[in-house]
Each structure stands twice: as C-alpha cells, then as structure tokens.
Amino acid sequence: MNHSIFDKRNYPIVNVEQGYGEWAQTYEQVVQDAMDIRLFERITAVDWQAHDYILDLACGTGRIGAWLENRTNAIIDGVDITHEMMAQAEQKNIYRMLQQASVFETGLPDAQYDLCTQSLADEHLPDLHPLYTEVARVTKAQGKFVIVGFHPYFLMLGMPTHYNNADGDDITIQSYVHLLSDHVKAAYGAGWSLVAMDEGIIDDDYIAHKPKWEKYYGTPISFSMVWQKLEVGQN
Ligand SMILES: C[S@@+](CC[C@H](N)C(=O)[O-])C[C@H]1O[C@@H](n2cnc3c(N)ncnc32)[C@H](O)[C@@H]1O
C-alpha cells in the first residue's frame, strides 16, 4: 500500500535516491539506534560469528556493517541504490565490496552468502516479493536473512520516513506500508522459513532518547524477522 493514504504530515515526497542523496551527510546524527540496533542485539537465533560471507542489503552509510564488524570476522559486502549513502559507508572501511544496485536485482552471484541483513529499508520498497526472491537467490541453502524494519503500525499513524533538506524543509521519502503478513506471504513464496520474530515498542528507553514521542508510548515502532532458506524440496 502506498503510504500516502495514511500520511498526516503531507510534506513534499521525493524518491529514494533524491531523499537519501540529500540526507546522507546527516543521516547518522538523526537515525535512532533504538529503532533497529536494539532489535539486532536481542536476536538469539543467529550466531553472528558462525558465518564467512555476509551481505548487508540497503546498507546505507554502513551502520549495520559497523555493528556486524564488532561481532564477526566474516567478509561483509554491501548493496545500496543511493551513491551518497554508500560513499559514507566506504569511508568506514568495513565492506569488502559495495555495489550500487537495487535490492531487487543486486547483480551478485547465486548462493554466495551465509547470512543477509537488511535494516530500515523495506518501507521504501513498493513490493516485497522481488526482495525475498533476490535474497533467496544470493543466499546459500540453510543460510539466513535478518530483516529489521519500521513497523507498519507506526507508519499507519501517518509518519513516513522524513528528513530536513539543506534549506531546513521537511521532506518525506516515498514509503509503502507492508503488513507483517505481507512479509510472511512473500518470504514463504520465495522459499524461506520463519525462525524468529520480535517487535520493538516505544518504551521508557525509547522515550529517554526521544522525549517528544511520549504520546506514542506502547506503540510498536520496529520489527525483526529471522528467515532461513529451505533446501530445494523442503517445506
Ligand atoms: C533508512 S536507510 C537504512 C540504511 C542502513 N540499513 C541503516 O540501517 O542505517 C534506507 C536505505 O535503503 C536504501 N534503499 C531504499 N530502496 C532501495 C532499493 N530498492 N535498493 C537498494 N537500496 C535501497 C536507501 O538508499 C537507504 O540507504
């Protein structure tokens, strides 16, 4: 579903590459680790050290790569569609290779990665099927896919991802609402099995970092899912 039917702010809307291209320089000063990193830290279904090759999809400025680097000796590659975000990631010297491409069509070889990650990007994808299909293609059999996202309930409150441009104007980046069941349908259709799931809510910790969200206390803000790729013929 296009987010515009829920939008309560009605800021001007730009596409992903324009939006993240303009936001790249200040993105890490704004994004809240409480949205996604705290969910990564709660995941027990993944042994981060047990993998040799990891792909970080929609890697942006490399926040998740930086988190992974402290937990694994694996080789980490990154894919993102926005050049300016990847330029920030490149400076971190974490990724073996950074590929400017869509998560729908990475251009990477088949069955290359033991583990794939994607954080805070599915709300910008008009459809989840090509995501789960492409990640299944590049992941080895029995490999895992950890996806962390902005919670659809929160998006439905009318607040899509937004940033301030160089003039200080509020700008929304084109967003879509995917129900959690949309993830399940797309992932099962692409040969994934759900291993674990979690949700993060606006709680005391969150309010401590973002006091103005007190009014959303108790609302789900983010989710995580750990998928495992089935062997051919397994279901
Ligand atoms: C909110 S940022 C998240 C970046 C990083 N994963 C993090 O957690 O900080 C969203 C990122 O998704 C990327 N993105 C959005 N749609 C994409 C697509 N179809 N293919 C590849 N990257 C995409 C954007 O360029 C941006 O870097």
Image: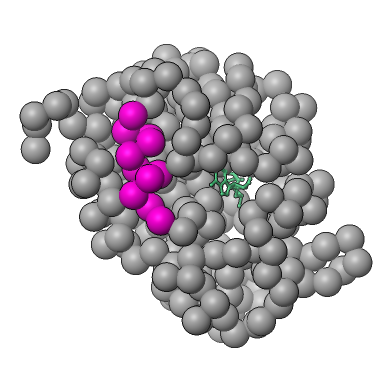
Q: Which residues are magenta?
A: 127-137
Is any atom of residue 227 visible in this view?
A: yes
Is any atom of residue 67 visible in this view?
A: no
**Residue 235 higher or lower than 212, as above or below:** above
Position of 231 compared to 22: left or right?
left
Which residue is located at x 53 percent, y 52 percent? 120
Position of 150 compared to 229: left or right?
right
Q: Camera-side residue: 205 or 229? A: 229
Numbered marks: total: 0
Instruction: Tell me which corner region of the image, top left, top right, bottom left or bottom right, holds residue 210.
Output: bottom right
**Residue 153's x, y, as percent?**
42, 73
Q: Camera-side residue: 76 or 186? A: 186
Q: Residue furthest right?
A: 167
**Residue 148's x, y, as percent?**
44, 49
Instruction: Tell me which corner region of the image, top left, top right, bottom left or bottom right, holds residue 35.
Output: bottom right
**Residue 188's x, y, as percent?**
21, 47
Which residue is located at x 51 percent, y 73 percent? 3
**Residue 125 higher or lower than 13, as above or below:** above
Q: Coloured how?
A: one colour
Q: In the rendered structure, does residue 232 fall within the stretch colored magenta?
A: no
What secondary structure prevails in the magenta region?
helix
Position of 28 compared to 232: left or right?
right
Which residue is located at x 14 percent, y 27 percent? 232
Look at the image and tell me in which quarter the N terminus lies: bottom left
Which residue is located at x 39 percent, y 40 percent? 146
Q: In the rendered structure, does residue 134 fall within the stretch colored magenta?
A: yes
Look at the image and tell me in which quarter the C terminus lies: top left
**Residue 7's x, y, as percent?**
57, 80
